[in-house]
Image (spheres, grey):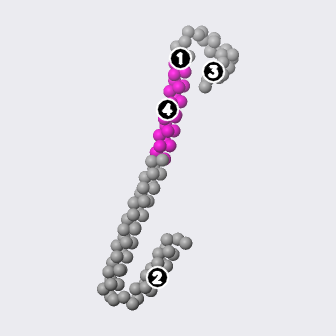
Amino acid sequence: MNDKEIASKITSYLDRGTADLKSGIAYRLQAARQAALASLGGRRMFADLRIWFGVLLFVGGIISFQYWQTAQQAHDIEETDAAILASELPIEAYLDRGFQAWLKRSEP
């Protein structure tokens, strides 16, 4: 059962129960019902905003983490390149296939 069906059932029960009431009492009940519905609509909209804020916060966190992870990987690559270029190995060592294999094994 969805919200509209429940609301229509409650409304029909209330209408049947208030059929024999005096007009002043019926008017006050109608005003109270409208005030309750108005406050319910405001609360529901606030809950929707909180949900959307939570979703946006979660997505923002994921995007920030991905950005940080990519920046960290780039920094690690730069650091490795700088260490290799600053070392005193001759250029032939970099061209040696064994050196390339050693580099691949030594990476974390």
Foreground label between 4 and 3? 3
**Residue 51's disc number:** none
Q: Residue furthest left?
A: 24
12 lies above or below 92: below
x 66%, y 18%: residue: 102
- Going from the N terminus, do you reach mark 2 or mark 4 first? 2
Instruction: Give the residue pinned by disc 2.
Output: 13
Which stretch did the figure color magenta? 59-82
Q: Which label belongs to residue 106?
A: 3
Task: Find residue 8 and report its horizontal and vertical position in percent.
Answer: 48, 78
Question: Split into 4 quadrants, where in the image is the C terminus?
Answer: top right
Kind of residue at badge 4:
Ala
Magenta stretch prevailing secondary structure: helix
Q: CA distance from mark 2 to mark 4?
A: 63 Å
- The residue beneath circle 1 is 83
Secondary structure beneath dot 1 equals helix
Give the label, 2 or 4, closer to the camera.
2
Dot 4 crowding, Cα within 10 Å, few <14, some 14–19, many 20+: few
Which is nearer the eye, 74 or 14? Answer: 14
> Which numbered disc flags the more N-terminal residue, 4 or 3?
4
Q: Which of pointers 3 and 1 lies earlier in the amino acid sequence?
A: 1
Answer whether residue 68 is magenta in the image. yes
Q: Which residue matches tag 4?
A: 71
